[in-house]
């Protein structure tokens, strides 16, 4: 990518242009963007993940879930400035919370390490955020999205759970259980991430709505995992998602009686 920084707006003062990072010929931003990637034994997939990441991002935070392969070494070879965080707990939710705490960007993007997400789409997420959204939520079922990695049973389950969230919380989501999302850091002050598993995306989607944050869906295409097998178990994790929905509905009723809610407080992991 050219080292010349294009101004955000035609005719911009050249003295202020260097404050901005070019994203495209039509968009430049000042806020730094952190990409958080939870990974466990994903060494074979990381080359596909990293090659699609845009060069203008501020940092990549890799949360290593105690990998037994050379995940960390491959990440450092592909992205020399990568920030590696050792996960202390277990589960995707725990990994993401750890990565959020270690990141320094004003904008945080969540990307899976299995090669299913296209990093080129990050520009769409960031564009939505700098245009006024608080939370940019990826959707495989919005117009322009798609998926190569969902069985009919999983699609049915996702639809049923998404419908339940929409009805119970007044959301208008077209997708629920998808991990490709981006948000401004201030969102972490308004939601309380206290789960450890795959249900973390559902919890975030519910709590941003409950917090009154502005959400914009971003059409996204989910590709097949390239190597290895997923730790996702449709029935087990579907039940965990349902449990989160029911719990949040119950909490919503109690909050009506207690209007002062408590904000997020998560601890950092070990950074190397």
Image: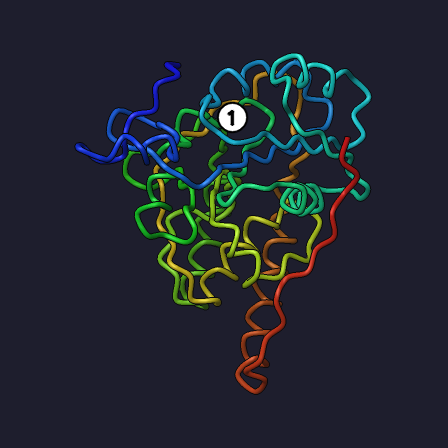
In this rendering, does residue 236 appear at all? Answer: no
| Camera-side residue of 26 and 45 | 26
According to the image, label 1 marks what residue?
116
Residue 62 locus on image (x, y percent):
66, 30
User: Across the whole image, how many numbered discs are drawn on residues?
Assistant: 1
Give the residue displayed 40% in from the left and 37% down from the top: 140
Instruction: Give the quadrant of residue 86.
Output: top right
The quadrant of the picture occupied by the N terminus is: top left
| Quadrant the C terminus occupies | top right
Q: Is residue 217 left or right of residue 227?
A: left
Q: Residue at x 71, y 49 (%)?
A: 196
Query: Residue at 51% of width from left, 15% of height from top?
Result: 51
Q: Is residue 231 above or below residue 158?
A: above
Relative image position of residue 50 (x, y in whole percent) = 55, 19
SS state under label 1: loop
Nearest to the observer: residue 244 or residue 20: 20
**Coordinates of residue 151 in the picture (x, y in percent):** 50, 33
**Is residue 94 visible to us here?**
yes
Q: Quadrant of residue 115?
A: top right
Q: Residue at image x 54%, y 41%?
A: 105
In this picture, is 163 found above or below 151?
below
- Front residue of 211/104: it is 104
Image quarter of residue 9: top left
């Amino acid at each position: 990518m050219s080292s010349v920084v294009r101004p955000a707006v035609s005719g911009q003062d050249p003295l202020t242009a260097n404050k901005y990072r070019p994203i495209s010929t039509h968009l430049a931003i000042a806020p730094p963007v952190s990409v958080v990637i939870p990974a466990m034994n994903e060494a074979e997939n990381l080359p596909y993940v990293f090659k699609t990441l845009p060069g203008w991002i501020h940092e990549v935070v890799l949360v290593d879930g105690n990998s037994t392969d050379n995940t960390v070494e491959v990440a450092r070879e592909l992205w020399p400035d990568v920030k590696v965080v050792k996960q202390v707990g277990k589960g995707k939710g725990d990994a993401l919370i750890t990565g959020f705490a270690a990141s320094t960007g004003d904008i945080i993007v969540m990307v899976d390490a299995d090669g299913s997400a296209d990093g080129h789409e990050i520009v769409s997420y960031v564009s939505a955020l700098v245009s006024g959204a608080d939370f940019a939520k990826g959707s495989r079922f919005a117009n322009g999205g798609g998926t190569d990695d969902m069985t009919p049973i999983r699609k049915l389950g996702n639809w049923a759970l998404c419908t339940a969230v929409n009805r119970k919380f007044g959301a208008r989501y077209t997708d629920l259980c998808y991990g490709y999302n981006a948000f401004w850091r201030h969102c972490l002050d308004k939601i309380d991430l206290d789960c450890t598993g795959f249900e973390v995306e559902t919890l975030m989607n519910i709590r941003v709505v409950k917090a009154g944050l502005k959400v914009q869906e971003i059409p996204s295409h989910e590709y097949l995992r390239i190597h290895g097998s997923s730790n996702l178990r449709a029935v087990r994790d579907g039940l965990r998602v349902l449990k989160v929905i029911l719990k949040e509905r119950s909490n919503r009723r109690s909050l009506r009686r207690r209007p002062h809610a408590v904000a997020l407080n998560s601890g950092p992991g070990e950074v190397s």
